[in-house]
Amino acid sequence: MGLVLLALAYGAGMVWFIYFADRVTIADHTVLVLDLKGALVEESPGGLRDKVLGELQGASTDSVRLRDLQMALALAQKDPRIERVLLKLDDFKGAGLASLREAAWAIEQFKTSGKPVVAWSAAYDQRQFYLAAHATQVAVHPMGMVLIEGFGRQRNYYKEALDKLGIEANLIRVGQYKSAGEPFILSQASEQALKAQAHVYDALWQLYTEGIEQARKLPPGSVVQHIDSLPGALQAVQGNAGQLVKDWKWVDQLQTFESLRQTLMDTVGKDEDGQTFRQVGFKDYLRAHEQPVKGEHLAVIVAQGEIGDGRAPAGKIGGLSTSDLIRAATEDEEVKAIVLRVNSPGGSAFGSELVRDQLRIARDKGKPVVVSMGDVAASGGYWMAMSADQVWADASTITGSIGVFAMLPTGEGLMRKLGVNTDGYRTTWLAGAYDPRKALEPRVQALVQSGIEHVYTDFIGKAAQARKLDVAQMQALAQGRIWTGAQAQAHRLVDRVGNFNDAVQAARELANKSAGTDPPLPIRYWGPQVSKLQSWFQRYGMQAAAQLGWGVGQSELAPLTGLPAQVNGELAADFIWLQALLDQAQPYTAAAHCLCQITP
């Protein structure tokens, strides 16, 4: 009996701690600290189990949801207790340019309140600096620097290595610009791939530099001019990179964090312990403002990551799981419109079609649908958007890539080198016709080619119908070519250029017209809900487990010794993607993927 009472008391104590003891108190003259750790994402990847395992393995599981950053700034803008914002960017891993522009817009909106934003980092890379540039005041450590390199991407090409191993990639594709599988069949980038990349990279670089120059009130073109002046300009200041970027007016002052901390203590006052300035972290700040959305609302469904056929956790798209969310929102009478936020380079053509068709059903049932494109909405990511009433993209979104491919690697040469032969009885030629141990059967290749061409014809036909273009016009815009959001709008591949907030406002207006609803409707994110217990465990339980040393084995994808970390990362990414392609249940998969994540 005593043990039962003890267990009950312990359980009651845990419930009290989770629900009541963790409440946040915010005093007047408080600094909202945006200590951004990890990448800026639409949805934190993985479930609770994945996060726990990552923490135990010592891998960083930190990420910042874009909507949390935006909401914290929007609330703080009107909160008289928040006196200013500190933007701390040491551990910020960045995002695509569209997400950075969304976050920068939120900072600019906050500044309209007249409250200052102070940015600090030991050093800035170009992703960190894009956000910092929009602060009222930018500080960097006296030994720090700002590294703006420009945009570009170099990929590994594996043809010669595969030839030496005796492996044939057997890439089957439709679209002259569909370059996703090229690294496995070429030794260098194709002319078409370089042409498409240059068209997009140059446009993105212009958006990036203009954003920096406008935010910092610098002369147009000065960012590129300063880069071109290196290394002479750095030699002129005896290698002092911090002083150089201050002279260029990229930063306002050189300051250690301890000095900045003292400045803030003198400005806003000390906390209760008297050890630092009065502050609240943005996650705690959001917890203090948690309020469930009830009644009529807009349903926001996030489609982030690679697209698969079935069900997927947060941070990836499952054809079944994402379409189930859309179906549930469609059938909910309190949902007056659906906003699909897409940040995906594509993946399974079938999974993409499941999502697109479910959006079509929502529209047919009178539910307005608006798509908002984030960093990338290309290939399968574009396919999903083709049933929307309106498609919005940021000027820097990577979209298009309307093309399809399949890959059927074979290792007949490797088998010969090993002296291994393959033989056996089959009732028809099709039984085991695709065998990676043997050369690709010509009839299999013909079957796959026909299937790929059919999927591509279906893709451009649906796209032409959705965009009100004839098929010949769409054919000229397709071919697997990528476009920026601004370029896509010029070619009528999207309706409007704007941010997520613009897309939400458009959905409100459509909902008002179709259902007689008076805007503004609140938004509610539809997806896996995190309970208070799960939230508590994520904040405290994983840290405790790591501190107790509950370790697990290292990743099965151990790095190749002697190779730089960047090379190992690229090799792993390329071959994990290829393995996922080969692990599909079907003999082959029509992949609507662009492999085109372009991050600053």
Image: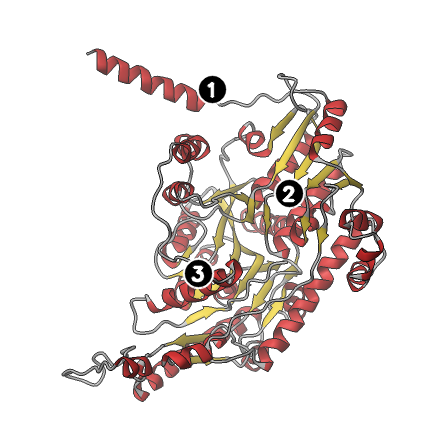
Looking at numbered disc 2 in the image, what kind of residue is underneath it? Answer: Leu
Q: Where, by quadrant of the figure, is residue 445 drawn?
A: bottom left
Q: Which residue is mark 1?
A: 21
Q: Secondary structure at mark 3?
A: loop
Q: Nearer the viewer, residue 142 or 460?
A: 142
Q: Which residue is mark 3?
A: 561
Q: Residues within 10 Å of mark 1 (few under 14, many from 20)?
A: few
Q: Nearer the viewer, mark 1 or mark 3?
A: 3
Q: Which residue is mark 2?
A: 89
Looking at numbered disc 1 in the image, what kind of residue is underneath it? Answer: Ala
Going from N to C along the chain, the mark reached first, 1 or 3, is 1
Residue under the image location 55 percent in, 34 percent down: 283
| Whole-number angstrom distance, CA of label 1 to CA of label 2 | 30 Å
Q: Nearer the viewer, residue 252 or 535?
A: 252
| Whole-number angstrom distance, CA of label 3 to CA of label 2 | 32 Å
Residue under the image location 73 percent in, 37 percent down: 118
Going from N to C along the chain, the mark reached first, 1 or 2, is 1
* In the displayed structure image, the side of residue 200 where residue 137 appears, left or right: right
Which residue is at the far bottom?
442
The percent position of residue 410, horizontal first and vertical second, equals 33, 79
